[in-house]
Image (cartoon, rainbow, N blue to C red):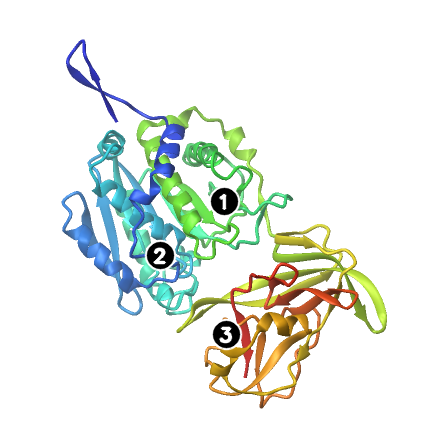
Amino acid sequence: MSMYNAFSGTIMRQYFSPLEFSHRIFDCYDMYKESTIDRKNFKHSSIEPLISELKRNRKFSVKKLGESVERRSIYLVSLGKGSRDVLLWSQMHGDESTATMALFDIFNFFSKDDDFSDVKEIILKNLRLNFLPMLNPDGAEKFQRRNALGIDINRDASRLQCPESRILKEIRDKLSPEFGFNLHDQSPRYSVGNSFKIASISFLAPRLNYGNEVPPVREKAMKLIVDLKNALSEFIPGHISKYSDDFEPRAFGDNIQSWGTSTILIESGGWQNDHQKQFLRKLNFTLLLTSLLSIAEESYTKNKVKDYYCIPENKENIFDLLIRNVILKQRDKFSKVDIGINRYEILTEDQGIVFRGIIEDMGDLSGYYGSEEYCFDSLEALCGKEYTEVIESYSDLKDLNFEDLLNEGITTINVKKDLPKDGFSKYPILIKSSEISAKIDNIAVKSPAFFLLRKGKEINFAVINGFLYNLKTSTNNVYNSCIVQ
């Protein structure tokens, strides 16, 4: 942003503090979002055309650093003319892609000539930015954590057995960056301390060893995290935490910190109904650009280390769905229980990411919280029934009224043929091959999450694959169900 000084006839530059900048860039995010990537389970082939575009852009330098186990290219994207290097690496775990999406949004930000040109000049004049957008392309291909050798790259910093690990180590040693950003995703079931709030973003300035010393290299990372916490608190107050700082001698973050690069771990957790992590992507875009401005202007240096320690640690005490105080009959006795359910992601060829809902725990869960949480005092939990008619073909299901079936207490339908091979369905009911005689009729820990909730003889709710169907309001929240065959 620039302003004209009428007295001198010169252009005056208008600078933003990191906090002001974060507000402005958050509001303008849609201008920079890379539209070709809109789902988190994209592959290496999705970024290749974007990398080719960057190669043609004079603002960027693109180098192929090497190849993965399965010979997919691993790239370094660089820009800026500053004397201080910053290194950002993403998706060393193949199924942790939130920051990768944000990095391509950031490339779009630096590609455009717009009202943020002054901020870009500050960053690029002072810093040399270096990005490894996808360190584990083989893992991304199958949307799995580990690489093609079955090795967790983030536990290979000492032995360096994987080509991806060696690439990261070699570029770190070559650049000797002042700051490093280790970009990950974490479970959406972490809370901020012992609160009910999901840890949407977690930070960490890793230890250098088993002690808890704070030498200058770690102190700088801590102070920068304070800037980022303050900025994000404007958008997600109460949803920011500190990752566990137990020392892990095999991990890259801990080692890169000890090698002299001030390292910040960023973990993207969860946000309600953000299955594709698009809101968390926006937060990553905002916080990473904010951090670059803070480093360039050294505004983080004013912060205090004690404020870093005030950030609460995350705790794994959130269920995806928590139903409290329902009545359950077991062995001819009634008891009041809470039912905690988690939905586990599965990547399918046809439907992309789907979920399998499992009853994770039962009993007194008063020390836990739910991403979705309901208190159903006096409602009875019970298993559903099977539909008496066997359906000839999967395609015939489109003619059924599933809400009517659920109101009758039916949660399972038997089908003769043409069932989808991936084992999942969009219909809000459990589908079973007619060749299978076993029934899904158990409400117990580690069982599939299919049951009904009723008051008297009236069924009020159905839990289908861990999703709640509100029969009182005809609200179907079932993302997908399962097929047993």
Which image quarter: residue 389?
A: bottom right
- Dot 2 crowding, Cα within 10 Å, few <14, some 14–19, many 20+: few
> Quick check: 162 left or right of 425?
left
Q: Which marked residue is nearer to the observer: mark 1 or mark 2?
A: 2
Is the residue 315 above or below the residue 138 in the image?
Answer: above
Q: Residues within 10 Å of mark 1 (few under 14, many from 20)?
A: many
Q: Position of residue 143 (x, y in %)?
A: 40, 65
Q: Position of residue 409 (x, y in %)?
A: 69, 73
Q: Is residue 381 left or right of residue 428?
A: right
For the residue carrying disc 3, how many other residues have a C-alpha within 10 Å: few (<14), some (14-19), or many (20+)?
A: many
Among numbered discs 3 and 1, the one appearing first in the sequence: 1
Q: CA distance from mark 3 to mark 1?
A: 32 Å
Q: Of circles 3 and 1, which is in front? A: 3
- The residue tagged with tag 3: helix, strand or loop? strand
Look at label 2 and name its amino acid: Asp
Q: Residue furthest right?
A: 333
Q: Secondary structure at mark 2?
A: loop
Q: Residue 424 — which label? A: 3
The first of marks 1 and 2 along the sequence is 2
| Three-letter amino acid code at the position of disc 1 | Ser
- Three-letter code for the amino acid on which mark 3 is drawn: Phe
| Tag 1 secondary structure | strand
Residue in the image at 36% along x and 43% along y:
285
Q: Is residue 261 visible?
A: no
Q: Which mark is residue 38?
A: 2
Circle 1 is placed at which residue position?
A: 202
Q: Picture coordinates of residue 324 (x, y %)? A: 72, 56
Where does the N terminus fall, quadrant-wise? top left
